[in-house]
Amino acid sequence: MRPASVEAMLPFLGGHTGNPSGAHAAARRSRKAIDEARDVVADCLGARPGEIVFTGSGTEADNLAITGLLARRGGTAVCTAIEHHAVLDPVEHAGGRIVAVDADGVVSPEALAGAVDGDTSIVSVMLANNEVGSVQPLSDVDAAVHTDAVQAVTWLDVASLAARADLISVSAHKFGGPQGVGALVVRDGVELEPLVLGGGQERGLRSGTHNTAGIVGLAAALREAVDTRDETVRRLGELRDRLADGLLSRVPGCTETGSRDRKVAGICHLCFEDVDAESLLMLLDQAGLYASAGSSCSSGAMEPSHVLVAMGVPKELAGGSVRLSLGWSSTDADVDAALELIPPAVEQLRGDGAGWGRGPASARRRGAGDPPGEKQ
Amino acid sequence: MTRVLVAMSGGVDSSVAAALLQRAGHDVVGVTMKLWGGASDTGCCSVADVDDARRVAQQLGIDHYVFNFGDDFMDRVVGPYVADHGAGRTPNPCVECNRHLKFDLLLRRADRLGFDAVATGHHARVERDENGGRWRLLRGADGAKDQSYVLHMLGQAELARVLLPVGAMVKDDARRLAGELGLRTAAKPDSQDVCFITSTGGRQEFLRQRLPLHAGRVVDRDGRDVGTVPAVELVTIGQRKGLGLGGSPTPRYAVAVDVAARTVTVGAEDDLLTRSLVVERMTWVDAPVAGEVEVQYSAHGAARAATFADGVVRWSRPQRRVAPGQSVVLYRGDEVLGGGVASSS
């Protein structure tokens, strides 16, 4: 988390935190903090304060946008095949239409327009994909437009790119804020049916006592992310290029997923032939490098990535795909460590595994001061 | 210190296995194999079981991972299970899971990951011969819980890298130790059934969704119709109940199943008796063995005296026919020699 976000939250975690819906001094302090946070979020996302609805997550924001709009307007939904499950599942649940993407993981405005008909009331297109980082164009269609900007905030000017969108979802933990808090921009005049009924908070769109600390932390992180975006994109773009180019040149049988110039700066997505991603991630994890692949289901098992399937990546290659995400806190040293660890790890995993008796090829352990390969 | 990957199912035995290895000073990492994504309320693959395994790993302070072997499980275990039933055999999917998943895929992955050994919570013992350095597979110390039958496919290469730390314990002691260590799985009931079959729908419902099941005639040995069965694919040699023969004065058993002809032949108990049994797909723990052996053909059945030669078991005393597809395991005393699958012929 960004220190600025942690610091902003602390006054609302200890001591007497008032319920912002109350009528006493402590309540007013919380209320004021939320009001100010709302101003910040509105400014950062190019919206008006009255258009911001705080939620418990990006997923909840996506669900509220799609399910809430369909409940009010009727009709059906359209989305791309590479949406996060937080969009894909409510669209599929409502019997919506899924639009294919190209090999770079980008949807074409024509394909999108072709899927929209008189019955379509909402179209959802993510601004940047969470797995491969592909940036999507938002086009005008004859329906409400929702964009899942959860992955985009750190990298893209959401306020201008999503200026025509009716609904915009964000999630705090993706830009250095706390887990478990998100927001949805609901433009004036766009009517939604709430998913959660109760005390009528957030203009009746999201009942439930406010997560004051989380909302304040979200705003502080968003402010810093937007203010430092140009520098972040420049610095992390260079790091990502060094990481991706370094691995592509050092590891045979390694390919980059999609075109780099159509992606956000912070995502390095690679496929390693003849390697299973679970093993690679485990080796890297044991060495203290955290990467991911596909998406995780509730049991923690890895599931094949629907994004790679949609991009036409062959199954064998997708099975060895790894996403190395860089964030605002990533450093040169992180990239050095990845460039040092990953090539031998891939090499190690390419054996046939019938080598009992040869002894372990590596016994790297997580932990400070353990030089690779020394501990058996 | 050895690096050991412990296959943790979320049950008490593998929990204790992990604890024992850690206590012995090994560098232990836990893994739960996610094998089955379908609806099942039993067995080792539900989210709740993965949770149990992870929580035990947290209690012990060891790393825990989940390996998704769902596609392999479908290809190597569930698919053949369904196909075998379609061909009128009675397969043992737990044996195939051990053969292809736990002691092949997992072992090879563990090797690539740099582990020295893989451990499971099976009740069986692995010992090394003092003279030749050969590995031996022995029945577990708890006769009632012995699982050596389902491990008979392990050979020297596997046994050299497999640890079965609870095999030397009786189950009550394993539970007691789990309780002393405060492991949350201490009182968890034993798993009983095939992990991908639900207790509500059962085998019949599972197969009905994956296989065209056919009603069949039930005939006696003279070919006379005596009843019908709803699904000839689900009849097992030796079966007495569910053959539509209620009220028969003497018990009658399925003595032959012909799926193609959709016919089950029934006969008296004596008609089931046979002097020999042909075994296919034999594997050996060490060198092939011939001569006097004891043969076990169900997970917890008794081992019967026989001689073995050229893929044929010859019983010392007539035995009931073994359903084709069942695992047939050869022992001498407590030692597993090898095993295979009962032939249809």
Image (cartoon, rainbow, N blue to C red):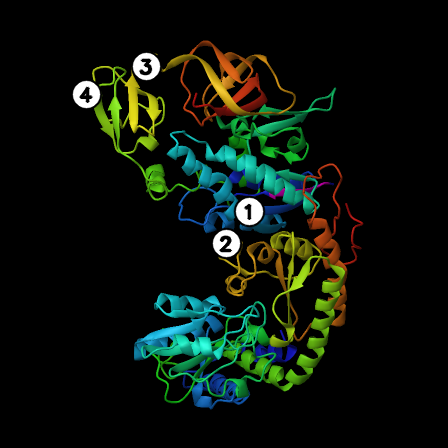
- Distance from disc 1 to disc 3, alpha carbons, whole Å, reads 44 Å
Of mark 4 and mark 1, the one earlier in the sequence is 1
Q: Callout 1, which amino acid? A: Thr
Q: Is residue B179 above or below residue A240?
A: above
**Marker disc for residue B269:** 3
Q: Main secondary structure of the magenta part?
A: strand
Magenta includes B5?
A: yes
- Span of residues in magenta: B2-6
Residue A228: image quadrant is bottom right
Q: Residues within 10 Å of mark 1 (few under 14, many from 20)?
A: many
**Callouts 1 and 2 close, C-beta under 8 Å:** yes
Of mark 1 and mark 3, the one earlier in the sequence is 1
Question: Which chain is indicated by disc 1?
Answer: B
Q: Callout 2, which amino acid? A: Ser
Of mark 3 and mark 4, the one earlier in the sequence is 4
Which residue position holds label 1?
Answer: B32
